[in-house]
Amino acid sequence: MQDYHEYLDKVLISEEVLQKRIKELGSQISQDYNGKQILMICILRGGVMFLSDLIRHVSIPVAIEFMAVSSYGSGARSSSGDVRITLDLNTSISNKEVIIVEDIVDSGHTLASVIELLQTRNPASICVCTLLDKFSRREVQVPIKYCGFKIENEFVFGYGLDMDEYYRNLPFIGTVDLKRYDPTV
Ligand code: IMP
Ligand code: MG
């Protein structure tokens, strides 16, 4: 396994910048839903770091739930549009104010499918909070209410996002130099 320093192109978003923006998002959500209680649904596994930092800045009652979706296998770098729910919610979302928390919206296929499914369960409202928006890659429109950062079309990793499942634990977001990445070593 290569050390990430071998293929890290640059630090795109530092830990400090990430944390400052996440604090702002938490405050904004708390203001917007003032007087209500919310349910944040984290899409595993990429959304985990973001969710756990975000909820620390939410000052209204917040419950959390997890869902896992598979869009493409390890090694592939783009979503197929063939999205399967691999872990479903444990609780009803009927009449709840739902916020889906995701690491990145790329083609949009993953979130479009998740929203379509959750809408059938009659939530009071449903919206998306994504840390990153790779807007130029969009193939299906997804309504994004809260967005941390819009980014260019580069493969990124760290802070929940993986390089073939590793390095989700990095506290910053980096870009990958795919020419220097060798998954076989
Ligand atoms: P979409 O269905 O194409 O919008 O893909 C969304 C999913 O693809 C995200 O939840 C990520 O898991 C993954 N993904 C997309 N772009 C990147 C990236 O640059 N780095 C790591 N994972 C990514
Ligand atoms: Mg993912």
Image: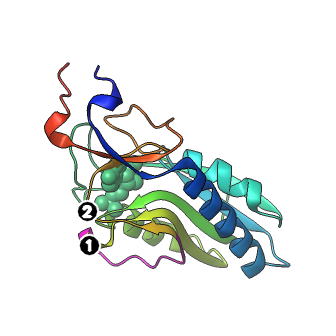
**Front position in the image: 38 or 46:** 46
Q: Does the beta carbon at disc 2 come under 8 Å from ligand 1?
A: no
The reply, left or right, for residue 110 in relation to residue 155 is right
Picture quadrant where residue 167 is located: top left
The reply, left or right, for residue 128 in relation to residue 4 is right
Give the residue at mark 1: 136
Amino acid at circle 2: Asn
Disc 2 secondary structure class: loop
Percent x, y of residue 81? 25, 61
Question: Decide: marks 2, 1 in contact (CB < 8 A)?
Answer: yes
How far is disc 2 from disc 1 in space, using C-alphas?
Answer: 7 Å
The reply, left or right, for residue 58 in relation to residue 16 is right
Q: Quadrant of the C terminus?
A: top left
In the depicted structure, whether residue 10 falls above or below residue 6: below
Magenta range is 137-147
The reply, left or right, for residue 26 in relation to residue 77 is right
Q: Residue at x 44, y 42 (%)?
A: 158
In the depicted structure, whether residue 184 falls above or below residue 82: above
Q: Which mark is residue 4?
A: none
Percent x, y of residue 122? 61, 75
**Front position in the image: 23 or 75:** 23
Crowd around label 2: few <14 · some 14–19 · many ≥20 (10 Å):
few
Percent x, y of residue 112? 38, 70
Tell which circle, 2 or 1, labels the residue nearer the N-terminal end.
1
Q: Residue at x 56, y 48 (%)?
A: 15
Disc 1 secondary structure class: helix
Residue 139 is inside the magenta segment = yes
Give the residue at mark 2: 153
Q: Residue at x 21, y 56 (%)?
A: 80
Q: Residue at x 56, y 60 (%)?
A: 101
Crowd around label 1: few <14 · some 14–19 · many ≥20 (10 Å):
few
**Front position in the image: 154 or 14:** 14
